[in-house]
Image (cartoon, grey):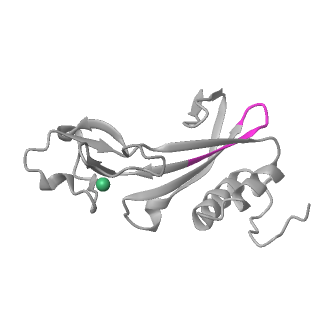
């Protein structure tokens, strides 16, 4: 049983199936923000695609960075919960406060697109111009175990 949750719509997708292929932006080098792409196939013949916006950055709780909608970035967590992997924001510099107790850790975001055919998967990958290499690698890996997916061709335009 596989569970995928879309963090924006809060929709939970539960299915029997398997992961066909994935690629993590971490493969391109260690960075504080990156994208993961996963392509699944359900036993009923659907192709859920998960795109994950990942972050290891943390901000100050008081006087920390705010997002475009004016809200503080991240969720409050104890400074002690952080690992060496986490990265201090270079703008609000929470670690400059030597008595720091709590910080705001950026959340990870997941978008789920349920594709109902191999062609839809290919299209979903092409739409993702922000992460073409990651989408391409995930698709190539999925294509090796699911030959019904056409070879990836990002330049193939779709005229509607
Ligand atoms: Zn910050």
Q: Residue at x 80, y 59 (%)?
A: 150
**Residue 44 is covered by the magenta coloring:** yes
Q: Quadrant of residue 91?
A: bottom left
State which image quarter holds ligand 1: bottom left
Q: Residue furthest right?
A: 160
**Residue 78 is covered by the magenta coloring:** no
Q: Residue furthest bottom?
A: 155
Q: Residue furthest left?
A: 98
Horizontal side of residue 107 vs 64, given as left or right: right
Q: Position of residue 104 (x, y in %)?
A: 30, 43
Q: In the figure, 96 relative to 104: above or below?
A: below
Q: Quadrant of the C terminus?
A: bottom right
Q: Quadrant of the N terminus?
A: top right
Q: In the figure, 98 relative to 159: above or below?
A: above
Between 61 and 157, the one nearer to me in the picture: 61
Q: Position of residue 88 (x, y in %)?
A: 25, 56
The residue segment tinted magenta is 42-51
Q: Residue at x 60, y 64 (%)?
A: 130
Q: How many marks?
A: 0
Horizontal side of residue 8 vs 42, given as left or right: left
Q: Position of residue 20 (x, y in %)?
A: 65, 47
Q: Position of residue 4 (x, y in %)?
A: 58, 34
Horizontal side of residue 18 vs 106, given as left or right: right
Q: Residue at x 54, y 36 (%)?
A: 7
Q: Residue at x 37, y 64 (%)?
A: 30
Q: In the figure, 155 relative to 37: above or below?
A: below
How would you classify the magenta stretch by its main secondary structure? strand
Between 45 and 36, the one nearer to me in the picture: 36
């Amino acid at each position: 049983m596989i569970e995928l949750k879309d963090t924006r719509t809060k929709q939970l997708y539960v299915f029997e199936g398997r992961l066909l292929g994935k690629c993590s932006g971490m493969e391109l080098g260690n960075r504080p923000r990156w994208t993961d792409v996963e392509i699944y196939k359900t036993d009923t013949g659907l192709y859920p695609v998960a795109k994950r916006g990942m972050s290891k950055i943390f901000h100050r709780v008081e006087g920390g960075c705010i997002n475009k909608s004016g809200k503080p970035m991240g969720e409050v967590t104890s400074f002690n919960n952080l690992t060496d992997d986490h990265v201090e924001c270079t703008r609000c510099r929470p670690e400059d406060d030597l008595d720091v107790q709590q910080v705001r850790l950026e959340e990870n975001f997941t978008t789920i697109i349920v594709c109902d055919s191999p062609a839809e998967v290919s299209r979903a990958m092409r739409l993702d111009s922000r992460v073409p290499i990651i989408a391409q690698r995930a698709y190539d890996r999925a294509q090796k175990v699911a030959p019904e997916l056409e070879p990836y061709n990002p330049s193939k335009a779709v005229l509607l």
